[in-house]
Every structure is written in structure tokens, then in C-alpha cells.
Image (cartoon, helix red, strand yellow):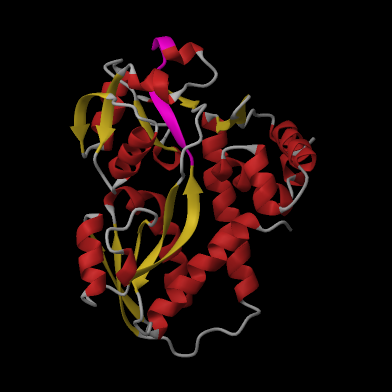
Amino acid sequence: MNPRHVTLRQFRYFIAVAEGGSLSSASRMLSIAQSALTKAMLELEAELGSRLFDRTSRGMALTPQGHRFLASARKVISTVADATRLHAAEPAGVSGTLAVGVSSLVAGYYLSELLSRYRRHCPDVQVQVTEETPRFLEHLLINGELDVAIMVSNALGEPQALMAEALTRSANRVWLASNHPLAAREEVSLVECAECAQIVLEADRIDDLMRSVWARHQLKPKVMLKTSSLEAVRSLVGAGLGLAVLPDFLYRPWTLDAEHVDVRPLRDDLPTVDVGLVWRRGSGLKPAAAELIELAREQSRARRLPA
């Protein structure tokens, strides 16, 4: 087969499986049979001549080639969404300023694609971006100093004052050195993780989400280090000094130390880490902010809807 025969449907199916972390999750998201998804992914891999997923009894983990293809697939879907929008009614004369907040971890994951599309659609809007901690972003939103923020949206400190809308959900997996004893397993349990030294990432409230998970399972992990640096986590895990439980969107298998860091799915069911839009509840959104939110929604829907 030839890669030029890859269809838009396959791109969307692939993104759904990659973001859902399993065929069953993507099947529910797309409302199609799991067998159809399996067939589509096998055909896609055959057409590309690359293995995109590592398949286990608990889910589908992207290979390094899969991660690279995911970045390309998202660009394709974004381009299609832009083309579709050319036939819709464009916002008339949107101008002024737009104050956007973003947390440090999310900035490199979601911001560039969305703001690039926004600039094309609203060239007369002056966009100001503020990177801050989730707690301070919420403060700025409530005070009206930000119009909208892009951040982890299912761990808000002031949910009664804010509106949140998830754009993508990321499964949690175990990061460990390739020579770690647990790396021989296809999947790992939380009990097994709790018996090992933990490298905890204190950023974007990801540690708060995991703290509640440990408590719910009545486990007390052995914490070796808490750090706000993702690079420190990668280095320490890669050196075999501990393992980490983190969302998939942070894993970059093409980084220099990726060959030392593997990921394994968890046997236990954990809540996802949601990246989404947050804005002040009850406030009237100005046109510039409403347009950003609609573009983000379109981008999210385009990744999930079958062709």
C-alpha cells in the first residue's frame, strides 16, 4: 500500500485511539464498533510501513513513530477544520485585545496550534499571553485580568467561580527506566508503583490529582523527590532512581533521554488529566474570547468526529 491512500477517517480514528489510550475508549468516543477501529489501525500501520502502537491487554501505547505521526495527524485535522470554516460565516470585524493565560506544562502541548489558527482567523486582535501557575491563573480569571485560560481543567481550586470545558483527555501511565525491574511487565499496578521510589512532578496540579488517587487506594508511595521540573523527572527516572505516574501528553519519546525512559499502562483505572478552557463564570465573553473558545471547540471536535 501507499501512504498517499491514508484517509481523513483514518487520521481521526488514529487520534481518538492515541488520546483515549485504548480501542474501547476510542470506540465509545466515536460511537463505532471496536472491530472497525482495529481494522482501521492495522490498515494505517500497513500503509505507513510503521508500527504506531504497542498493544497490551490494557490499552494502546504510542511508539516513537506513533508520537511523530500524532503531531502530523493533528496538523492535518487542524487544516481541514480551517478549510471547513471558510464556508461558514466568519466573525465580522473582531478586533481589540485578548488576554490568554496558560500553565507551563500545557503551553508546549496545546497553545501553539490554537493560537496559530486564531491569528489566521482574527488578525486584528492583539493577543497577550500570560504563563503562570494554575492557582494564579484562576486569580487572574476571577479578577477579570484574563479572558480565558488553557490549563488542566479537572483540578480547579475555585470551580464555583469558573467555567471549564475539556478539550482533550490524557491517560496516566507509569514512567520508568528501560532497565527497571517493572519494565519487564506489560502493565503495572498502583500497589507495585507504591513499593518503588517515586519522582513526583509538582506542576499544574498533576500531583494533587495523583495524591487523591493514592489516598483512594489507601496507598502511601515512597517519595524520593518532588520537583516542578519535567526535565528533572525525565533525568531521574531515566537514571533508574525512581518512577513517576504522569499523563501521556507529557511523554516525548523523541527527546534525548527517551531511550532510557519507557512507559507502561496501569492495571488500575485512574482518572484522566484533562486539558481544557477555563473562564470566569457568569461573565459575558467579549467577541475575541468567544471566537477563541469556538475555534478550540472546533479543533477538539474535528479530532473526534468520523469523516
Q: Count of labels shown?
A: 0
Quadrant, the C terminus: bottom right
Front-lying residue, 136 or 208? 208
Front-lying residue, 80 or 208? 208
Q: Is residue 261 visible?
A: no
- Residue 265 in the image, given as x and y percentages of width and height: 51, 28
Residue 197, by quadrant, is: top left
Outermost residue on the bottom side: it is: 93
Quadrant, the N terminus: top right
Front-lying residue, 44 or 214? 214
**Residue 135 magenta-highlighted:** no
Residue 84, by quadrant, is: bottom right
Q: Can residue 43 be seen in this view?
A: yes
Left or right: 114, with 231 as reference point = right
Front-lying residue, 299 or 75? 299
Does 5 appear above or below 100?
above
- Residue 144 in the image, given as x and y percentages of width and height: 24, 77
Left or right: 129, with 75 as reference point = left
Does 192 appear above or below 131?
above
- Residue 33 in the image, given as x and y percentages of width and height: 78, 45
Which segment is the magenta one? 171-181
- Residue 217 in the image, given as x and y percentages of width and height: 39, 31
**Which residue is rendered at x = 50% and y = 30% of the image?**
268
**Which residue is rendered at x = 26% and y = 56% of the image?**
134
